[in-house]
Amino acid sequence: MRHPILLLLLMLAACAGPRVATAPGASSRPPVILVSIDGLRPDYLARGVTPNLNALAAAGARATAMRPSFPSLTFPNHYTIVTGMRPDHHGVVGNNMEDAAIPGVRFGMGNRDAVGDRRWWDGAEPVWVTAERAGIKTATMFWPGSEAPVQGVRPTRWLPFDGEMPGDRRVDTLLGWFDGADRPGLATLYFDTVDHDGHGFGPDAPQTTAAVAAVDVQIGRLVAGLQARGIVANIVVVSDHGMAAVAADHIIRIDAIAPAGSFRMVGGGAVAGIEAEPGQEVALAAALLQPLSHAQCWRKGQVPARFAYGRNARVPAFVCLAEVGWYMLAGPPRTGMTMGGAHGYDPAAPEMAATFVGAGPAFRAGTVLPPFDNVDVYPLLLRLLGLPPRASDGTVAPLQKALR
């Protein structure tokens, strides 16, 4: 691995060098590479194991924190980042969903058919669709939503998610896309190991720190690969949410609160979506809407306004939010289930803070931004791509001072 100071000098030299054009017919601007490190809390960058990420931040801009959208879950927030819409507006309201307009189907992260069904994603236009329509080639490495032909458009290059693909192969595959005839003007890259180990061991565990260090090596591999190809890129590194520690005995059993046979849980965890079984609406409401220990439930139309959530048809009838560090289940934990860490909590909780780092010729070196909402990343991406602004829930204003 290059020494972080040398890497920083390479980045600064690259920023001063000539720009490399994207594919014919696309913009001559530097390509944009959007990197997600799932579950990367901003304070992880202070653990002394991220020289490459810290070098990018020093050569460009970073935020002290980026606020995720509610619920602070993986699929909703990844789609928010690339559409600028909050989950209630783009329709990916949870990692698990039901939709009366798509009967008999339960959307889940492991349901390959549902993940590739555009009907779940068509509520908003992700940035790769906008770019493709503008003649900019795109390439996506595992970004949620990119496996479906959203609004009838696919990225020029994409791959179905493969959690077993190691980080170096993910990086090398993406770099290889820049060697082909259809060089992308926008590319995305996704790493899931920090989130995986954060769940399994907790955010403060040495295994999680080791996962952070391993991903940082891949960031160095990406930067070195671009440098070797003479490619000057604007790199935006984000995470979808943070991670909170959960004790093994901090379990809230919904089946111990609601009458037997009165509910089905669409999604559980830090945030739960609950539907009433036929004829059980009154009984379920009486059970869930009473004061609860370590959680609070609302009817979907009465979720606090600051969460901007509860109007979409896919939001279940009742939404419950656990106190940070607690976890909701429909029944007893499954055999072998570990409770090291979780997310999905109130986006304002410090443990849920997400990461933002931007580096490249578009960014002012050494800029530190105060906290902003993750809906603001989307208008930034449009600006970097040279595409006109589009209506969204975000604004580029909070990031303006970071831009040249």
Image (cartoon, grey):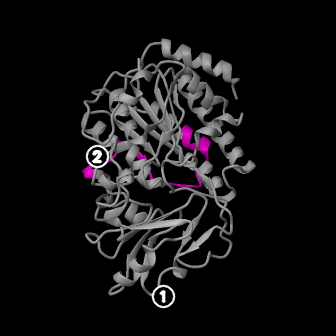
**Within 10 Å of the Cα at label 1, are there few (<14), some (14-19), or many (20+) other Cα atoms?**
few
| Few, some or many residues within 10 Å of mark 2 (<14, 14–19, 20+) | some
Question: Toward which corner of the image does residue 286 lie, by quadrant?
Answer: bottom left
Drawn side of residue 260 relative to residue 40, left or right: left
Is 171 contained in the magenta span? yes
Residue 55 visible, this orientation? yes
**69 versus 398 height, above or below:** below
Position of the C terminus by quadrant: top left
| Quadrant of the frame with the N terminus | top right
Q: Are marks 1 and 2 in contact (CB under 8 Å)?
A: no
Q: CA distance from mark 1 to mark 2?
A: 41 Å
Instruction: Choose the circle earlier in sequence order: 1 or 2.
Output: 2
| SS at circle 1 | loop
**What residue would you read off at disc 2?**
125
Given residues 232 and 376, the one toward you in this image is 376
Q: Could you say whether the residue bearing mark 2 is in a helix, strand or loop?
A: loop
